[in-house]
Amino acid sequence: MDRNDLGKGGEPRQQASKRERTMTTAQGGPIADDQNSLKAGARGPSLLEDHVMREKIFHFDHERIPERVVHARGYGVHGHFELTEAIPELSCADIFQRVGEKTPTFTRFSTVAGNKGSFDVARDVRGFATKFYTKEGNWDLVGNNIPVFFIQDAIKFPDLVHSVKPAPDRGFPQAQSAHDNFWDFISLSPEAVHMTMWQMSDRAIPRSFRFMEGFGVHTFRLVNAEGQSHYVKFHWKPKQGLQSVVWNEALKINGADPDFHRRDMWDAIDAGDFPQWDLGIQVFDDDFADRFEFDILDATKIIPEEQVPVRIIGTLTLDANVDNFFAETEQVAFCTQNIVRGVDHTNDPLLQGRNFSYLDTQLKRLGGPNFTHIPVNAPKCPVHHFQQDGHMAMHNPKGRANYEPNSWGEDGGPRENPEIGFQSYPAEVEGEKQRTRTETFADHYSQARQFWISQTEVEQRHLASGYIFELSKCQEERIRLRMLSHLMNVHDDLARMVAEGLGVGDMPEPATPARAPITDLPPSDALSILKNGPDSFRGRKLGLYLSDGADAELVTALEDAFRAEGAMVAIVAPHIQGVTLSDGTARAADEKIDGGPSAVFDAVALVFSDDAGQRVAGNPPSQDFVSDAFAHAKFIGWTQAAMPLLQAACVAATMDDGMIELSRDSAGDFVNTCRKLRFWEREAELAW
Ligand code: HDD
């Protein structure tokens, strides 16, 4: 049976007819020989007349389309949104009317700065864009995994992006913000300070797309059937809980598996473990907006959940991988302007600019105005209009009339309908034209301080280390100090930790705030990852390092216990052929030890036969497996036979409660321990 006889999952496919299986040109002509071009004589020149070769190479030459100018590296998945609470009193959007109704979706996760071929676990914001194919048209919620943004006005976006992308003269660094240009721009743009707090926190190195939140960022409007408007902020809350990796681990994951996040998503969905997010809304009115300490149109500010609780109204389930990456993930075109009746924009100047940029960029990227004809972008409701022609038009309006109004009656095509058509909320607008930044956008530090005091000690340490790492990559002292001068306005502890990490003795003068005083806001638990962690190891992965002769009963007990938890178990072994356990049964390996470092697992267990422990102890990848797991505060299950390796990895002398001796009866206890995900107590003892 050859490859063509197998379906997607490797199962035998029903025999197609010979004609169906015959390779053809794009014109449908059957091809007799796809290996050799047409030549004049066996050793003669190739002939221009070879339409088969010319067509094949012509098409290949044109395979690439421009990658997205930002968010180039992304991963798309199909799913559906199910409404759990109807909100007709807030919005007349069809999608929000009937509990239990499912709306198909397409979600694309992405990094921002890196090229299409960059690595997944860069320190970066993650895009979280969802297209809802509603019965009243497509609604695109194009958000991020961080609820605030770097800049307040879209006119600064090209500068922001230029500063983070590779420097134009040298073409590097790739997919990183740890360089002079980025921090030069940021330290000259105090409005970005709050966002960098999130970006330097572990939010920017998520363990998986599945374990991160999403945010619509801007304040939008919900408008009900009576035309009443409420303000709204959209939240995606992962049912899987929040989880991130640590920075040193991220660096190693990127080497071991640059596709870590996309592979994780593919594997989870392929295994039927469908990730879910609740859609939450923070709803408020003009009274609240007037009372609130900050401007609700300022995208560099959150509205703390303690002030306006998040109300859950539905669930997104991602349940199908794409059939084709290019056709779907690459060609999907999100536009913030894609809204439906019952949802509307506000005057947030970032959002207003985005509404231009997305449509514009799709034209460039997808080559013409008919990108809505591409299946992943096409609405799943009826579409009737008089738009026609253009590159790659797949369908044009039928009939004689292609204009409106017309007097062709029934045959004259679609008509407008004010009853069900989109109505803009009639917000009052007045004022002189001016290029200005409102005073109400001027407090750049108070919420950054609130973020800091809302973090656990572990997270504060990571956050400070994030700044230290990034600023240490800045060669210009003036840029490092300028950034430090902002951090002094955020919090003394943060500034001191970063100064120490950079080796700065004399602190600079604090930056002059655009607006004083900087307010002390109360902490908000919702801002911490660790305060919102999961209570299970579900969806996580154990790296089970086995040798030949490993105790079969213990191995089975571990596998059973972790699978019962809903976790994955990957077998790591000295050879990819796998191992033979003590009872003679075989275990296929998922990874050879040097291809499956502990950085790609959430917890590890070492189960060796007595003599194997000594053998692997001298093996550098095995030593790294253990010492990295230890340094990344992971739980490590071990058996006595692994002691020589623990010694060789220099962790035996500092055995702590995160290192669990395994026995056949204690596999369940090990799972319970792993539910905490990391043994952070250890990290405090390590001198990072
Ligand atoms: Fe943007 C892509 C999210 C500000 C201009 N953006 C893009 C994507 C996401 C976001 C998730 C990827 C969509 C996909 O997967 O195809 N962008 C945001 C958020 C912002 C934001 C949450 C602030 C709140 N963006 C922003 C501004 C501008 C843009 C201010 C321009 C003025 N963004 C774009 C773009 C992109 C894009 C150039 C590149 C590819 C694309 O649109 O389709 O138009």
Image (spheres, helix red, strand yellow):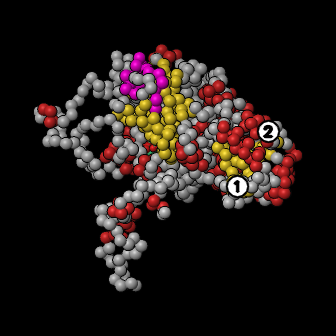
- Secondary structure at numbered mark 1: strand
**Residue 202 at x, y percent in the picture:** 65, 39
Residue designated by label 2: 665
Q: Is residue 480 above or below residue 618?
A: above
**Are circles 1 and 2 on residues that touch, CB within 8 Å?**
no
Name the residue type under label 2. Answer: Asp
**Could you tell whether 57 is left or right of 284 in the image?**
left
Query: Which residue shows up at 81% across the image and 57% down it?
Result: 612
Q: Is residue 92 magenta?
A: yes
Query: Which residue shows up at 38% across the image and 46% down it?
Result: 362
Query: Which residue shows up at 49% across the image and 63% down it?
Result: 1
Q: Is residue 231 magenta?
A: no
Q: Majority secondary structure of the magenta segment?
A: loop
Query: Which residue shows up at 82% across the image and 37% down it?
Result: 657
Q: Is residue 296 at all visible to an observer of this figure?
A: no
Residue designated by label 1: 586
Looking at mark 1, is its residue's CB closer than 8 Å to ligand 1?
Answer: no
The number of callouts visible is: 2
What stretch of residues is rendered in magenta? 81-96
Q: CA distance from mark 1 to mark 2?
A: 22 Å
Name the residue type under label 1. Answer: Ala
Q: Is residue 386 above or below residue 327?
A: above
